[in-house]
Image: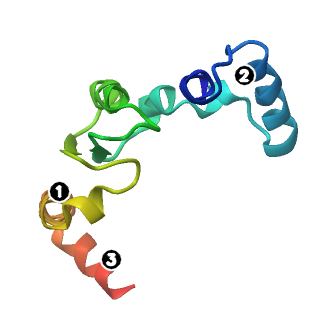
Amino acid sequence: MTFQLKLQYKLPAFPFIPVTSLISRWKAGYFFGEASALQQLANVQVPVLFIHGEADTFVPTEMVYRLYEACPTEKELLTIPRAGHGTAFQVDRTRYEDVLQSFLKKNLSHSDSVNTLNT
């Protein structure tokens, strides 16, 4: 949020981030600091596939590298050139599907795969 506040509106983090964090606590039950993806990775116990568009201007690509490095479990990173925020699948569907399929095959046991497909 701090990044977008500065980029889009040329506004400083203070007082906007603390105030909206307080509103989030009141309305949603958590402060922004509790919703930190970077901090929450410490709790991850399953393999993680990170997918990010290299042309993302909403969440800078540099941020996915920090998340990847912080992940304590089996992990894989896929970045898609020319893909913006949330458009990796549309920009390179073949690579996206290949990497996803490989990741799932490597990280799901046969019985888990069968159970997932049957539900």
Label 3 crowd bin: few (<14), some (14–19), many (20+), radius 10 Å = few
Q: Position of residue 101 (x, y in %)?
A: 16, 66
Against 94, residue 24 (above or below) is: above
Asked where in the image residue 61 lies, by quadrant, the reply is top left
Q: Secondary structure at mark 3?
A: helix
In the rendered image, which residue does mark 2 sit on? 17
| Front in this rendered view, residue 35 or 94 | 94
Q: Residue at x 33, y 47 (%)?
A: 46
Q: In the figure, is residue 99 to the left or right of 65? A: left
Give the total of numbered labels.
3
Q: Nearer the viewer, mark 2 or mark 1?
A: 2
| Residue highlighted by disc 1 | 103
Q: CA distance from mark 1 to mark 3?
A: 15 Å
Q: Which is nearer the N-term, disc 2 or disc 3?
A: 2
Q: What colour scheme has been applied to the protein in the rendered image?
A: rainbow
Question: The residue under label 1 is which amino acid type?
Answer: Phe
Q: Amino acid at mark 2?
A: Ile
Tag 1–tag 3 contact (CB < 8 Å): no
Disc 3 marks a residue whose amino acid type is Thr
N-terminal-most mark, 2 or 1? 2
Q: CA distance from mark 2 to mark 3?
A: 40 Å
Q: In the rendering, which numbered label is found on residue 116?
A: 3
Q: Is residue 110 above or below residue 104?
A: below
Q: Nearer the viewer, mark 1 or mark 3?
A: 1
The numbered mark, 1 or 3, whose residue comes first in the sequence reads 1
Residue 22 image position (x, y, % from top left):
83, 27
In the picture provided, is 18 more to the left or to the right than 36? right
Whole-number angstrom distance, CA of label 2 to CA of label 1: 36 Å
Indicate the quadrant containing the C terminus: top left, top right, bottom left or bottom right. bottom left
Category of crowding for the residue at label 2, using alpha-carbon neighbours closer than 10 angstroms: few (below 14), some (14–19), many (at least 20) = some
Disc number lying in front (2 or 3)? 2
Between 64 and 40, the one nearer to me in the picture: 64
